[in-house]
Image (cartoon, rainbow, N blue to C red):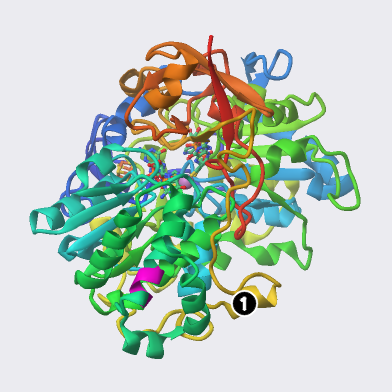
Amino acid sequence: MGGTIGIPPIVSFVKASGEVRGACPHDCPDTCALVTSVRDGVAWKVQGNPGHRPTDGVLCTKVSRYTERTYHPERLLQPLRRSGPKGSGQFEAVGWDEALDDIAGRLKAIAARDSQAILPYSYAGTMGLVQGEGMAARFFNKLGASLLDRTICSTAGGEGLTQTLGGKVGMKVEFFAESKLIVIWGSNSIASNLHFWRLAQAAKRDGARLVCIDPRRTETAEKCHEHLQLRPGTDAALALALMHELVTNDWLDHDYIAQHTVGWDGLRERALRWSPERAAEVCGIPAQQIRTLAHDWATTKPAAIRLNYGMQRVRGGGNAARAIACLPALTGAWRHRAGGLLLSSSGMFPVEKAALQRPDLLAGRAPRMVNMITVGDDLLRESSPEFGPKVEAVIVYNSNPVAVAPESGKVVRGFAREDLFTVVLEHFQTDTADYADYILPATTQLEHWDIHLAYGHTDVLLNRPAIAPVGDAKTNTQVFRELAARMGYAEPCFADSDEDMCRQAYGSTVDFDELLDKGFATLQIPDAPFADGAFPTPSGKCEFFSERLARQGLDGLPDHLPNYELAGSSKHYPLAMISPPARNFLNSTFVNVRSLRDIEAEPVLEIHEDDALPRGIASGAVVRVFNDRGEYRVKAKVSHRARPGVVNGLGIWWRKLGLQGTNVNQLTSQKLTDLGRGPVFYDCLVEVRAE
Ligand SMILES: Nc1nc2c(c(=O)[nH]1)N[C@H]1C(S)=C(S)[C@@H](COP(=O)(O)OP(=O)(O)OC[C@H]3O[C@@H](n4cnc5c(=O)[nH]c(N)nc54)[C@H](O)[C@@H]3O)O[C@H]1N2
Ligand SMILES: Nc1nc2c(c(=O)[nH]1)N[C@H]1C(S)=C(S)[C@@H](COP(=O)(O)OP(=O)(O)OC[C@H]3O[C@@H](n4cnc5c(=O)[nH]c(N)nc54)[C@H](O)[C@@H]3O)O[C@H]1N2
Ligand code: SF4
Ligand SMILES: [Mo]
């Protein structure tokens, strides 16, 4: 394993044969409990743990093929050093010591000038708290590197929820099975939240009505009783019109509002400006659909909203999440355990973040913060008083920015800089790894320890290694430990083992022996957490009006903010484009797994026949999709899944496995959301032409 002296071995527990309990590491709300079957040191099957209630013994198609990914013939097995021009994808094998010595030397030289010229870039390739921002955060804090604002997924909705409810908190997912009305809002649950969908199906069998709110006619929308196929970025208008109906029909829980909310007078006044007719115009749906939903929301008990992040990837995404989060308090839906709303449960986990990440190692320094969404612009910036030092080195782990970050033409130009030193820790030679100076082979979840929270249920999961590292792969933690040793960092925390860090993640709040024994532990949370108010906001109430936002000079009440790139506002680019995930990929992960890519076949753009016919576009034709930021080529699919005026470019393909080396992010913009500094992937105008 080539570990440095004094550093514990990576894996302290690997069974040669048997079953090993683990956790799915992927960025998915379901965080399934895994059981890996091992024979003679080889993992041959990964299954869902039947003893874990949220998993219920079932995995999605992607992860049930996990061994195919782990033993993939293109898995990176040894460190690689660039041997051709930047981006050429040409590398030569190199030993670990040589690679790490050189990397540490380069980082030391840059840090001697200004450590903020070094930028970590990571996201949720693994959601594990240890292989994620565990040892890596310690390393970068000690180094004083630039901080990364990890905004690419959920910060707009997260901030909206936090301003209104006080945190990423909500209903316990299991009680959706008892709901009588479930509103699935901005989520293709069958594809991206399968285990919630199973609960919704159970509720449906018990007589529940399912309503889906989505611009795309997804497989989920098709299976609901009602589909509100609104224009992208108009959810706040819809929510305000629902409130309008609650007010004018007096479908309100006055007692709940009086006791457990603040700002009702102002919100009421605002909602009264949003008649269903006005909202219908903005959303592009019939006013009657809005009236019916308001009626059902008010009169069905218990009623619940499964909000997901699809609705917040537009300019007004934060406000939209705020407006929607007000709805359960207005009707007192929170009183019942099967009523209320769930966007994310991650705020309910008592993670000891400071113990894991050690911000004290900054020792009073406050490095500049770089937003991961604007990496395209930021890698192309020179030093300036506003920006700080030019970025000279990027260390990428758990992320594939060249494929997933917006406006990828600029991201590619940034990573192609000959004077940028880039290290990528990866399982595969991704689009980003192609631009590396060093690629370091990383272990997968089957090969390392980790501990998890979830954002779609409330169980802590432990992941034990099932097999030894494949090839010469090392854990992320081990790479940062060994770099720390070479940088001369002597703090004992750099010698903590992965198992130590798993124990530190929750301190004494979670019984580690229970985790070792069962693989998971359920948090003790009341069944109906907000039945009597007690929201974790400053006022302890559901904040329709946010004093905190008002103090920042922002609107204290939620409002509808039209998209930056509003349909109809551009002669050149008449179509709105959204780019939600493809079912058989997880962001850009799994695109290189043959059996899964074969199901998706190739990158597609769904287009309605009203838009396809005048453009002479037929299904199967390769079309050019473009705007001022760039263009990409994709197979058109004339489809009822697209609404007129909106095309769906399903993501997120590896550029090099798509058509002509680009993907949908060639077209998306680096603008930020109203709250949370988030991305606006679905706020994007384009034109489409037949080739
Ligand atoms: N199979 C699969 N599962 C995944 C992922 C994946 O890539 N593949 N990604 C994972 C990740 S990173 C996340 S963050 C989660 C959550 O991921 P989400 O981004 O919530 O993913 P989806 O469930 O596809 O929900 C997005 C839905 O929102 C719709 N939508 C787009 N714009 C709007 C809008 O303006 N308003 C409304 N109401 N709807 C809109 C899209 O058409 C799509 O159906 O899923 C995770 N699960
Ligand atoms: N157009 C468009 N763009 C989007 C989105 C969209 O809906 N539309 N969705 C956005 C969202 S919600 C998100 S969350 C981001 C996701 O962006 P990312 O978090 O970058 O997700 P992935 O593309 O899955 O890339 C994760 C990488 O981490 C690697 N990895 C996994 N485990 C480990 C490990 O243990 N160690 C190391 N070193 N590497 C590991 C995987 O091999 C993979 O290449 O993309 C965003 N981009
Ligand atoms: S990706 Fe989601 S559904 Fe699939 S195994 Fe992982 S947690 Fe479960
Ligand atoms: Mo995400």
Query: Where residue 478 appears, x then y in whole percent?
Result: 55, 43
Instruction: Decide which of 76, 650 is in the foreground and name it.
Output: 650
- Direction front: furthest residue: 277
Query: Where residue 654 appears, x then y in whole percent?
Result: 51, 24
Query: Where residue 312 appears, x then y in whole percent?
Result: 50, 52
**Rendered image quadrant of residue 429:** top right
Please state if 252 lies on the left or on the right of 494 as rendered.
left
- How many residues crowd mark 1 within 10 Å: few (<14), some (14–19), many (20+)? some
**Is 291 in the magenta?**
no
Q: From this viewpoint, is residue 603 visible?
A: no
Instruction: Decide which of 267, 442 is in the foreground and name it.
Output: 267
Instruction: Please determine whether, in this image, residue 512 is positioned above or below residue 225.
Output: below
Query: Where residue 388 appears, x then y in whole percent?
Result: 85, 50
Instruction: Please determine whether, in this image, residue 586 is positioned above or below residue 22.
Output: above
Instruction: State the SS at label 1.
Output: helix
User: At label 1, which amino acid type do we have?
Assistant: Arg
Please state if 516 lies on the left or on the right of 12 as rendered.
left
**Rendered image quadrant of residue 493:** bottom right
Region rendered in magenta: 243-247
The residue shown at (38%, 85%) is 257
Q: Which residue is mark 1?
A: 548
Please state if 616 lies on the left or on the right of 148 as rendered.
left
Q: From this viewpoint, is residue 247 visible?
A: yes
- Mark 1 within 8 Å of ligand 1, using the beta carbon: no
Please state if 234 lies on the left or on the right of 597 as rendered.
right
Total labels: the figure holds 1
Q: Main secondary structure of the magenta part?
A: helix
Instruction: Decide which of 306, 508 is in the foreground and name it.
Output: 306
The residue shown at (39%, 70%) is 243
Instruction: Please determine whether, in this image, residue 26 is positioned above or below residue 537.
Output: above
